[in-house]
Amino acid sequence: MKGATNPKNFDRIVREVFAPIYPTIAEQIKERTKITQGKCLDAGCGTGALGRAMARISDLEILFFDQSDEMLSLARGYADDEKLGDRSTFLQGNIHAIGLEDESVELVISRGSSPFWEDWHKAYSEILRVLKSDGIAYIGGGFGNAELRDQIVKTMSENNPDWRNSFKDRIGPEREALPGILTTLNPTSFYIINDESGFWAVITK
Ligand SMILES: C[S@@+](CC[C@H](N)C(=O)[O-])C[C@H]1O[C@@H](n2cnc3c(N)ncnc32)[C@H](O)[C@@H]1O
C-alpha cells in the first residue's frame, strides 16, 4: 500500500482546513459533466466530503467507496448528519477490483486518492468498466481555485513547512503516465484540466 492516509488526522484536516474546497469542486464537476441524476461513485471517498457536496447540488445517488472501513464509517456518520442517508450507499473495497457490475454508474468522481493507487492502468480500466456508456469519470486532485489553494497551502505549511513538497513526488509520476494509460484504454474521449482548480482527467466512456 502506497502511504495510507490516517483517518482521524485526515478527518480533522478536512473539517478544519479543506472544508470549503468541496462545494467549489462539486460545482465544477456539475458544470463540466452536466450529470445530475443516476449513480455517482466517489472513489477513495475518505470521509465523503466531495460526494456529499455533489449530493447537495444534484439528484445523484452517491456510492461512497474506500478501502478504509474507518473512513467509510466517518463518511456514513456525516451523510446521516446531513440527512443524505437515503441517497447514500457505502462500499469497502480496492479500486483495482471494484465490487460493482459492469456499466452500473453514470459518474465517477475522485479527489486526492489516485496518487495512492498501485496500478493506474488497472484502476482506470476498472473505473471505465463500471461506468455506463457515455458516463463520465472526473478524477484528480486540487483545491478548487487559486484563492482556496493559496489559503490551504499557507495554513498547512504553518505546521509543516514541507507540506507542499511532501505530496509533489506522489502526484508527478501519475501525471506523466496518465495520457499514455488513457490512450491505451481508448475511451470515447478524454481531456486533462491542469489549472488553478487542480489536475483532473475528464474521461467519457
Ligand atoms: C487523501 S484521501 C482523499 C479523500 C477524499 N477523496 C477527499 O478528497 O477528502 C485518499 C483516500 O483514498 C483511499 N484509497 C487509497 N488507495 C485506495 C485504493 N486502492 N482503493 C480504494 N481507496 C483507496 C484512502 O483510504 C483515502 O481515504
Image (cartoon, rainbow, N blue to C red):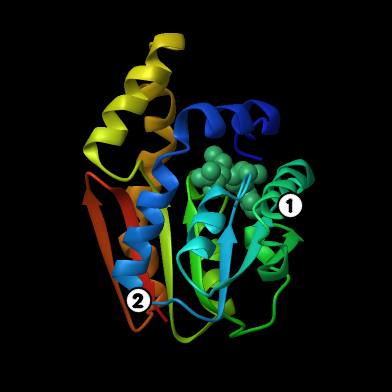
Q: Earlier in the sequence, mark 2 or mark 1?
A: 2
| Image quarter (top left, top right, bottom left or bottom right) of the C terminus | bottom left
Answer yes or no: is residue 116 visible: no
> As rendered, which of 126 and 42 lies closer to the eye?
42
Residue farthest bottom in this picture: 133
Q: Which mark, residue 76?
A: 1
Whether 47 is drawn above or below 51: the answer is: above
Residue 177 picture quarter: bottom left
Q: Residues within 10 Å of mark 2 (few under 14, many from 20)?
A: few
* Front residue of this view, candidates 132 and 53: 53
- Amino acid type indicated by mark 2: Lys
Task: Give, as a three-letter code, the residue at label 1.
Answer: Arg
Q: Position of residue 10 (x, y in %)?
A: 60, 31
- Does label 2 point to a residue whose CB lies under 8 Å from ligand 1? no
- Rounded to the nearest angstrom, the CA distance separating label 2 from label 1 is 26 Å
Label 2 close to label 1 by CB (< 8 Å): no
Residue at figure coordinates x 41%, y 57% from the top left = 26
Residue 145 in the figure: left or right of residue 66? left
Residue 53 left/right relative to 71: left
Residue behind mark 2: 34
Provide residue 99's location: percent of width, then percent of height. Answer: 73, 70
Quadrant location, the N terminus: top right
Residue 40 horizontal/vertical position (percent): 55, 71
Disc 1 is placed on an element classified as: helix
Q: Nearer the viewer, residue 98 or 121?
A: 98
